[in-house]
């Protein structure tokens, strides 16, 4: 029964859904319907105006940052670089994510060989021209799985990729999804990954 708005602008009204552990679900709906907003509520970045957003029975906004890394892997539409090395992009400076986990994540998305071919390997300092857009997207999946989260949140992650890169990203996703609950936003991921679809209606639709 979630209602949420940014200031006076109501975006979600009496929204209800439940997702079982291990389920793969796609949120669809037209632009501006509130799909990315739902992810922000699930991540506890905002509190609902009324109703409850519960993750394993706990109010999302009460989950601490430290716990969040174990619960959620969040892949946004574009990659956000942190100042630092390739390793830092994957660990986000979390000392609990060691070299083994870093390399396992990079291998999962098929970037390990590419990284090892660089002079400084995982210690290479990052700048935008180091990788292609698709490679950065693969790195963002590596970042999302490095903390071994139970839940993956994927927001339109193949939207700007060519067909061949999209296929690589989807393959990495299939591997990353095993044993996890996955929520994705995109028509295209649904077509290729399968699973249940939840349609998010914009509030002015059908009026
Ligand atoms: P798209 O498919 O285009 O990504 P979406 O379904 O993800 O759309 P949201 O990004 O959740 O839509 O936005 C829903 C509504 O909330 C839009 O009207 C948007 O302008 C508004 N909105 C989103 N973020 C904010 C914010 N930080 N502050 C104020 N309004 C916002
Ligand atoms: Mg969005």
Image: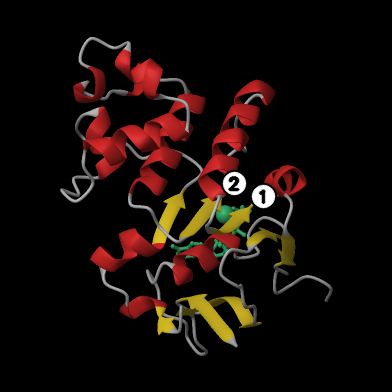
* Picture residue at 39% right of the left edge, 16% below the top: 114
Q: Residue furthest left?
A: 95
The quarter holding residue 92 reads top left
The quarter holding residue 118 reads top left
Q: Determine crowd level at label 1: few under 14, some 14-19, many 20+ residues with C-alpha closer than 10 A.
A: many
Check the picture and name the quadrant holding the C terminus.
bottom right
Which x, y percent locates residue 59?
40, 83
Instruction: First in sequence, mark 1 or 2: give its number.
Output: 2
- Nearer to me, 52 or 190: 190
Q: What element carries label 2?
A: loop
The residue that disc 1 covers is 186
Residue 139 falls left or right of residue 82: right
* Picture residue at 73% right of the left edge, 42% below the top: 192
Check the picture and name the quadrant holding the N terminus.
bottom right
Do callouts 1 and 2 mark residues in contact (Cβ within 8 Å)?
yes
Which x, y percent locates residue 22?
58, 63
The residue that disc 2 covers is 156
Q: Compared to 28, does 78 lie above or below?
A: above
Q: What element carries label 1?
A: loop
* Colour scheme employed for the rendering of this structure: secondary structure
Residue 125 falls left or right of residue 77: left
- Nearer to me, 117 or 38: 117
Residue 166 falls left or right of residue 98: right
């Amino acid at each position: 029964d979630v209602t949420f708005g940014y200031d006076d602008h109501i975006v979600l009204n009496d929204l209800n859904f439940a997702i079982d552990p291990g389920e793969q679900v796609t949120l669809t709906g037209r632009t501006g319907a509130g799909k990315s907003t739902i992810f922000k509520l699930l991540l506890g970045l905002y509190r609902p105006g009324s109703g409850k957003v519960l993750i394993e029975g706990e109010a999302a906004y009460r989950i601490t940052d430290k716990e969040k890394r174990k619960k959620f892997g969040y892949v946004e539409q574009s990659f956000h670089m942190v100042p630092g090395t390739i390793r830092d992009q994957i660990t986000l400076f979390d000392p609990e994510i060691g070299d083994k986990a870093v390399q396992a994540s990079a291998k999962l998305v098929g970037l390990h060989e590419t990284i090892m071919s660089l002079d400084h390997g995982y210690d290479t300092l990052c700048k935008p021209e180091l990788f292609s857009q698709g490679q950065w997207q693969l790195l963002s999946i590596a970042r999302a799985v490095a903390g071994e989260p139970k839940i993956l949140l994927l927001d339109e992650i193949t939207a700007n990729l060519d067909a061949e890169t999209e296929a690589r990203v989807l393959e990495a996703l299939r591997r990353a999804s095993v044993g996890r609950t996955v929520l994705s936003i995109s028509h295209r991921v649904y077509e290729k990954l399968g699973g249940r679809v939840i349609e998010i209606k914009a509030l002015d639709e059908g009026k």
